[in-house]
Image (cartoon, helix red, strand yellow):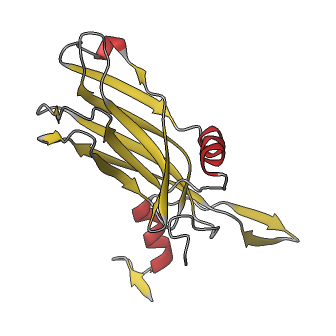
Amino acid sequence: MRGYVKTSVPVSLSLSLLLVSGFAAQMALANGEHEPVDATFQTTGTIVLKQSLRAGDFMLLKDVTPLQVVGGHVALKVPCDRNEETPLRVLVGSAGESGSALVSVELEIIEDLSTPRRDCVYHADLDVEHLKNELLAETGREVNITDIVLANSDENRRVRFGSDNGNTVTVNLLTAAGEDDHHDDE
């Protein structure tokens, strides 16, 4: 299937999708010919956090199944106490029908953008190799990171979000087909 621009120059549908999605494929040169190799691309999503998150509950920030996260960054502006602490945790791993495997990401506060007793800004780079090693230690199996969640670790109190609370998640994704830990039974 081909699309055309006003000058009647054909533009392939795959090139259009490449430009629209921001997808950047890596190509290898072998024997003078191009061969596709594992390709990665980056996606960013921003969510305005509304209302509240119940005690012990979570919300899904990103699910990239069947792809897998190979790097990324998380930033949050959320309620915090006077000690610059929040009960909210970012968890990464795989959530599947046969069981979930998630570990906590260590968040760092950005003090000059934070207002203790109100809102604090936290961020973290996703060190995928470290996180996968933690998942391996906890589960005894290799786990591809496909899910990122925001969890309220306080079992007794709801977290109420302000009108300007939100998060941004940027992830680098691997498009190559690998073992899909999201649905272990398939």
In the rendered view, would you say 125 is above or below 112? below
Please state the horizontal and vertical placement of residue 24, each as a whole percent of the image. 56, 58
In the rendered view, would you say 179 is above or below 135? below
The residue at the point 53 percent across, 63 percent down is 67
List the single residue furthest toward the right.
31
Please state the horizontal and vertical placement of residue 66, each as a whole percent of the image. 51, 68
Please state the horizontal and vertical placement of residue 115, each as a whole percent of the image. 23, 13
Q: Quadrant of the C terminus?
A: bottom right
The residue at the point 55 percent across, 75 percent down is 185
Q: Nearer the viewer, residue 11 or 40?
A: 40
Residue 143: image quadrant is bottom right
Q: Nearer the viewer, residue 80 or 47?
A: 80
Please state the horizontal and vertical placement of residue 181, each as a whole percent of the image. 56, 64
Q: Nearer the viewer, residue 21 or 47?
A: 47
Count of numbered tags: 0
Is residue 125 left or right of 132 when viewed as pictured? Answer: left
Residue 12 appearing in the image: no
Residue 101 appearing in the image: yes
Q: Nearer the viewer, residue 21 or 92?
A: 92
Q: Quadrant of the N terminus?
A: bottom left
Is residue 93 left or right of 82 when viewed as pictured? Answer: right
The residue at the point 43 percent across, 42 percent down is 91
Is residue 74 left or right of 40 when viewed as pictured? Answer: left
In the rendered view, would you say 82 is above or below 49? above
The residue at the point 39 percent across, 19 percent down is 109
Residue 123: image quadrant is top left
